[in-house]
Image (spheres, rainbow, N blue to C red):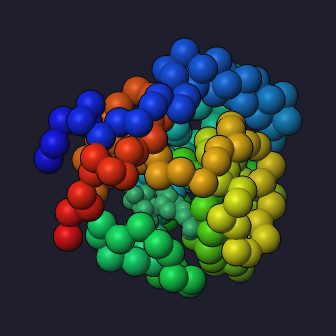
Amino acid sequence: MKDYQDFLDEILISTEVLEKRIIELAEEISMDYKGKNLHLICILRGGVLFLADLMRHITVPHTIDFMAVSSYGVGARRTTGQVRIALDLKEDISNRDVLLVEDIVDSGYTIASVLDILATRHPKSLKVCTLLDKVARREVNVPIHYRGFAIPDQFVFGYGLDIDEYYRNLPFIGTVDSNRYEPQD
Ligand code: PRP
């Protein structure tokens, strides 16, 4: 894998800006879920860094679980529609106040399918928190209750989001200069 500096176009959201916004979201969630049975569900894999930082700043008692879904092959960048469950939740969600934690909503298919699946399991409430919202790419309407940032239609990576599976560890969100990056197959 090339050094990311070779194809980084710009830092779209810096570490400092991410941190500040995540603290704000955590404060809002902590107020809204006071006295409730908050259960965070992270959609793997992109959401892991966001979940870890968000939960560090949530001040109400809560539990977590993980779910993985897949809609297209490794390395592909476009979604095709319905998703399938690749890894299901460990715990029952009935009577819990579920908050889905995602790194990005793009076409909306992933979150729409997950909402459909989870709604059949009778949670007490079911809401969505996404760090990034690529509004211009939306193909299906989805409710977003907590949104970190609306971003333009650019290919982004870092802070959980991969570029050909690499660089999820970067502490910022960067954009790719497509003239300087050849997708791996
Ligand atoms: C990404 C992202 C969301 C989904 C958003 O996941 O984490 O789950 O795509 O796209 P959509 O709104 O068009 O459905 P991806 O399938 O790339 O898996 P990953 O999180 O393991 O990278």
Location of residue 122 in the rendering, given as x and y in whole percent from the top left corner: 75, 71
Question: Is 54 placed above or below 1 here?
Answer: above
Q: Residue at x 70, y 60 (%)?
A: 136
Name the residue nearer the viewer: 31 or 3: 3
The extreme left residue here reads 1
Vertical order, 77 against 132 (above or below): below
Residue depicted at x 73% and y 75%: 140
Give the vertical position of 59 relative to 162 (above or below): above
Which residue ends up furthest to the front in the rendered image? 179
Task: State the image coordinates of residue 159 (x, y, percent, origin top left).
Answer: 43, 36
> Is residue 138 visible in this depiction of the protein?
yes
- Circle count: 0
Q: Is residue 39 visible?
A: no
- Residue 91 lies, in percent from the top left, at 53, 61
In the rendered view, does 9 fall on the left or right side of 22? left
Q: Residue at x 36, y 52 (%)?
A: 178
Instruction: Give the camera-side residue of 13 and 127.
Output: 13
Q: Position of residue 8 (x, y in %)?
A: 35, 36
- Quick one: quadrant of the C terminus? bottom left
Quarter location, residue 25: top right
Would residue 82 appear left or right of 166 to someone viewing this image?
right
Nearest to the observer: residue 62 or residue 2 = 2
Residue drawn 56% across the image and 83% down it:
81
